[in-house]
Image: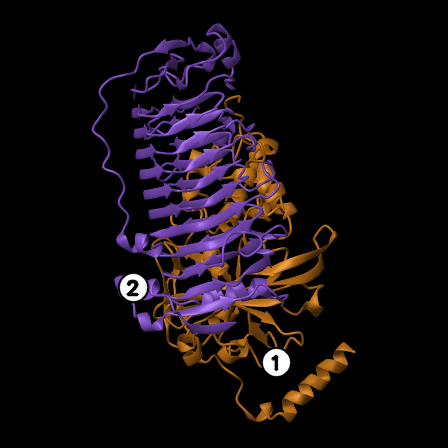
Chain colours: A orange, B purple
Amino acid sequence: MKLGAAAIAAALVCAGGAMALPPPSPNQTVIEEAAMPRKLSEFGLFRAGGAELSDGVLPYDLHTPLFSDYADKARGIWMPPGAKATVDADGNVQFPVGTVLIKSFGWADANDGKPVETRLLIHRSDGWTALPYVWDADGRDATLAIGGRRIPVSFDEPDGTTRSISYAVPNKNQCKECHALDGAIAPIGPKLRNIRFGAAYRTNAAGRIEGLSRQVAALPAWDNPASGSVAERARAYLDVNCAHCHNPKGSASNSGLFLRWTDDPDGVNYGIEKRPTAAGRGSGGMDFAVAPGHPEASFLIYRLESLDPGIAMPEVGRATVHKEGAALLRQWIAGMETRSAH
Amino acid sequence: MRVRHAAYIALPVAAILLGLSPAAAKTIRVEPDGVDANEKLQEALILAEPGDVVELAPGRWTLTDGLSLDVANVTLRGAGIDDQNGSILDFSGQQGAGEGLLVTSDDVFLTDFAVLNTKGDGIKSKGADRIVYHQLRVEWTAGPKETNGAYGIYPVESTDVLVNRVVVRGASDAGIYVGQSKNIVVRDSIATENVAGIEIENSYDADVHDNIATKNTGGILVFDLPSLPMQGGHNVRVFDNIVSDNNTPNFAPKGNIVASVPAGTGVLVMANRNVEISGNIFDENGTANVMIVGYRYEHKDPKYQPLPKAIVVADNLHGRAGYAPAFPGGAEVAAALGGSIPPVLWDGAGDAVVNDAVGVLSLNLPDVSMPQSDAKPSPADLSGDAPAALPGVRLPESMEARIR
């Protein structure tokens, strides 16, 4: 049945005259000027009728990705032809106006493997803007959902557990909650130490990233023991999953808990023997975010393993416990030397 | 969603003050009915433009996700705070977000609606300058429970904050909590059955006045804590409040600083400098009407100043207090003093001037590293010359104009 439907769909596309037209390419006017296009197809970032990236959109991957309910993510960068991105001293990629960062979310065993949602981060002359799109039931296009949406999703976790969740597509403001830097939207993922391109990069005709060949130590892959020690991989995990808010310019600046790769991992502001601030029920009755040697007494773990909105961290984008991620952080804390007895 | 032009006079005036075109202002009205009411309300908050009013129709929203507002100079206005005729945002079935409503833009005016039973905080505003909270209710309707959210009204990292005529009940941390902010007024509000009624933390220049703080664990708290981006709290005036019957057993989750507040606390100052407590009416606070203490936990912040300094207590009315002191050893001290301890309790750290005609009990623990077991309670005379009076907080006229 599925194949039959696909064939019919393909025939419809051909009958509609799509064969006679050049393949769609990203529409720079829409990207830079249309405030909030209703349909994702208007951008031309995907090939017509599906979720395959258009020519010139550069797929990329990350050594350590953000956990999002075990979703598989397909990421792409579009830069206008001839445009150049640069890498700043901190290893952040600075993208030109007209750039779109694209991230599609789906599960291999849900929705026939088609994506559920696609998020765009668009660099316009007045700054970055974030737009969430939910794919239509037929998987041919996606529709703007600026107010966010809840979508029932069932999938199998890596350990075989079948999970049915109410997956939350973030609203436009929630996009910014994570992507906020000094109150403005900024990309999170594409940092030189974390980004990874496939072979497509060499042949890509669209915009280029200058300075990509600069040698920087790669961020460890959180789940690959060959890429770093437990502590290093735990820090990579915290950087990617927490530090977009937990930095002095982020949404959690007032917490005083700062978890960037570059922060002092022994300091109180990294959570080591740090008492709760505005944590409420998030403290779980514990004294410290991280109690060295004692994951069971560390409320950082408690919050990562909770699904209660008044407790759970991150606050946005998680309706599932990342068991494997939490296990790594437990291992990291358990391996620390126990400090003062409290 | 119906759109119509604003008929409000105050709004165009505010818009002019902010240099915006008043012609652009419109009212976006949202209704609580329909399966997508949650999404529609959130959409309205996203699509609003500076100067707009998002108007909540009377009725009850059943919300599964937190709301957020990130557009400057927007008014969110409901029909009132009561269950029958008001605009009620009910988060009893909340599945996501750390609070009910999050505001991250400047010059926002929130008024005439209620936020109920959020899983985390009620209304939080972060980096939202000149925010006005007016005639709101934030409540956990089952009363004091450890599973209630932490803060009811929660402005943080903001300059110019006005909390006016709000009612907060049931917060498992603080009903009204202002943190890491400057130039703050909390007034004419009621905080009841929270762990802390009203709390000013790591903040500069605050006036807390004409409030009623009753049936909390602690009525009004002025705290300064270490290892935070903004610290060194100072210049706080707590005056003309009614602080009574704050004897609710502490129901804060352990680990949080307010979990250490003894039941029966009226006003508690921890660290901070230049705090004035005056003109209040205190009654029936079982531990103390006024408590002044240092931060006595271990910390590793060399910039932190753990002592209360230049704390002034004057011209207050003191009813019964100190009859059930709920700190370790309190009962023994009370027994030794004939059944109750004096209404003002000082741990002996830092310095304070107490000119009220009531007794002061010092625990004589001047060094904050001394354990409480070393306490040697004795009456103390802290009367003397107070430092120069604080000038008081003045908010921008545009904020006061909102509520006229």
Q: Please, what is the three-letter code of the amino acid marked with disc 1?
A: Gly
Tell which subunit mark 1 falls on.
A
In which quarter of the view is residue A69 placed? Answer: bottom right
How packed mark 2 is, by other alpha carbons closer than 10 Å (few <14, some 14-19, many 20 or more), is some
Q: Say if A204 sits above or below B310 in the image.
A: below
- Report helix, strand or loop for mark 1: loop
Residue B250 drawn above or below residue A32: above
Left or right relative to B312: residue B113: right
State the residue at coordinates (60%, 48%). Answer: A223
Q: Is disc 2 placed on a helix, strand or loop?
A: helix
The one of B284 and B198 positioned closer to us in this rendering: B284
Query: According to the image, label 2 marks what residue?
Result: B13
Which label was assigned to residue B270?
Answer: none
Q: Is residue B173 visible?
A: yes
- Lateral position of residue B359 relative to residue B338, left or right: left
Q: Residue furthest left?
A: B388
> Which residue is nearer to you in this view: A314 or B311?
B311
Residue A321 appears at what percent x and percent y? 64, 48
Residue A128, quarter of the rendered image? bottom left
Write the residue at 54% across / 43% down. Answer: A234
Q: Marks 2 and 1, how far apart in space?
A: 50 Å
Instruction: Look at 71% across and 59% down and name the residue there.
Output: A155
Q: Amino acid at mark 2?
A: Val
Percent from the top left, x then y, of residue B205? Answer: 29, 39
Residue matched to label 1: A49
Chain under disc 2: B
- Nearest the viewer among B178 and B322 is B322
Can you see residue B182? no
Which quadrant is the C terminus of chain B positioned in?
A: bottom left
The picture places residue B216, in percent across and down from the top left corner, at: 51, 32
